[in-house]
Image: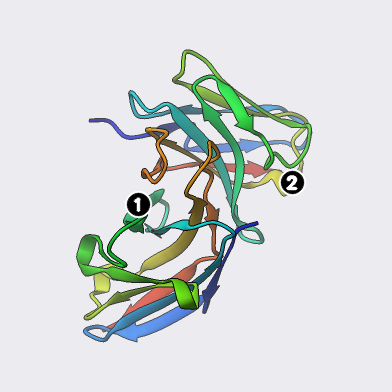
Amino acid sequence: AQSVTQLGSHVSVSEGALVLLRCNYSSSVPPYLFWYVQYPNQGLQLLLKYTTGATLVKGINGFEAEFKKSETSFHLTKPSAHMSDAAEYFCAVRHGRGSNYKLTFGKGTLLTVNP
Amino acid sequence: GAGVSQSPSNKVTEKGKDVELRCDPISGHTALYWYRQSLGQGLEFLIYFQGNSAPDKSGLPSDRFSAERTGGSVSTLTIQRTQQEDSAVYLCASSLGLAGDEQFFGPGTRLTVL
C-alpha cells in the first residue's frame, strides 16, 4: 500500500526566505511523485512531478523537489518565498505500473508568507 | 483549450435528498477520477474511469455513492440519501491515461448537506 506523510500541517516563512515543505512516502514499487498547489477556492494545480530519470525536478513558479530513494523523501523547496506562494501544498504518490493510476495524497501543508 | 469543468460549483441540499455532480473532462482524456476533499479526511480517492468502465471503485465510501461515465467523456457522481458527513468538496480530474501523466483537476463542487 502507498502512503504519504507531510511533516507540518502549517509552515510560516518570511518573504524572501527559503521555503521547505517535507514529504515522505511509502510505496512497494518505484513511485511516481507529484506536488500540487491549491489556492483558496480553486482546484489543484500541478507544480512538478517525478517519474523517472533526473532526481532533481524543477517545476513552475521557481519550485523544485528532489527524489531521494534512500530516504523515501520528495521535499519541495523554493529559494525565496513570495507573497503569492501562500497556498496549500499537497504531495502525492502513484504506482508507476499497472492500470490503476489513482493518487494518494498527503494531508497537505498550508504555507503562509509574512511580509 | 478548456480545462476540466464541474457543475454545480456549489450545492446545498437537505439530508436524505439525492444529488448529482457533473464533470466534463478535457477533450481526449481517457482517464477520469473523482476525489473528495474534506476537513477531517483530506483528499480521498473515490473512483477511476478508463473510458466508460470503472476498474477501481475502491474509494466509494458506501453504496449510496455511484458514478457513471458516458461516451468516454462526461461523468456524473450520484449520492443518494445524502448525510451530513457527505459535506465536502468533490473534485474531478482527467488525464491521458498513461503511466506518469499529469492529472488535471477541476475547480470542484462544494456540497453542503443540512
Is B95 or A115 nearer to us in this picture?
B95
Which residue sits at x=53%, y=19%?
A: B52
Question: Which residue is tagged 1?
Answer: A45
The image shows residue A60 at horizontal and vertical percentages of 23, 60
Q: Is residue A112 left or right of residue B45?
A: left
Amino acid at dot 2: Gln
Residue B114 occupies which quadrant of the picture?
Answer: top right
Which residue sits at x=37%, y=33%?
A: B96
> For the residue labelled by badge 2, is the local secondary structure a helix, a strand or a loop?
helix
The image shows residue A95 at horizontal and vertical percentages of 52, 50
Q: State the count of labels.
A: 2
The image shows residue B72 at horizontal and vertical percentages of 46, 18
Relative to B64, is B107 above or below?
Answer: below
Which residue sits at x=76%, y=41%?
A: B83
> For the residue labelled by badge 1, is the local secondary structure a helix, a strand or a loop?
strand
Is A42 or A46 nearer to us in this picture?
A46
Q: Is residue A105 left or right of residue A35?
A: right
Question: Which residue is tagged 2?
Answer: B84
The image shows residue B46 at horizontal and vertical percentages of 62, 41
Q: Residues within 10 Å of mark 2 (few under 14, many from 20)?
A: some
Q: Is residue A92 left or right of residue B14?
A: left
Residue B107 occupies which quadrant of the picture?
Answer: top left
Is B44 or B77 nearer to us in this picture?
B44
Relative to B63, is A2 above or below?
Answer: below
- The chain that hosts pointer 2 is B
- The chain that hosts pointer 1 is A
Q: Is disc 2 on the same chain as disc 1?
A: no
The quadrant of the rendering that contains the N terminus of chain B is top left
Q: Is residue A16 left or right of residue A86?
A: left
Instruction: Kindly report the distance in space between the C-alpha atoms of the residues bearing marks 1 and 2.
Output: 28 Å
Amino acid at dot 1: Gln
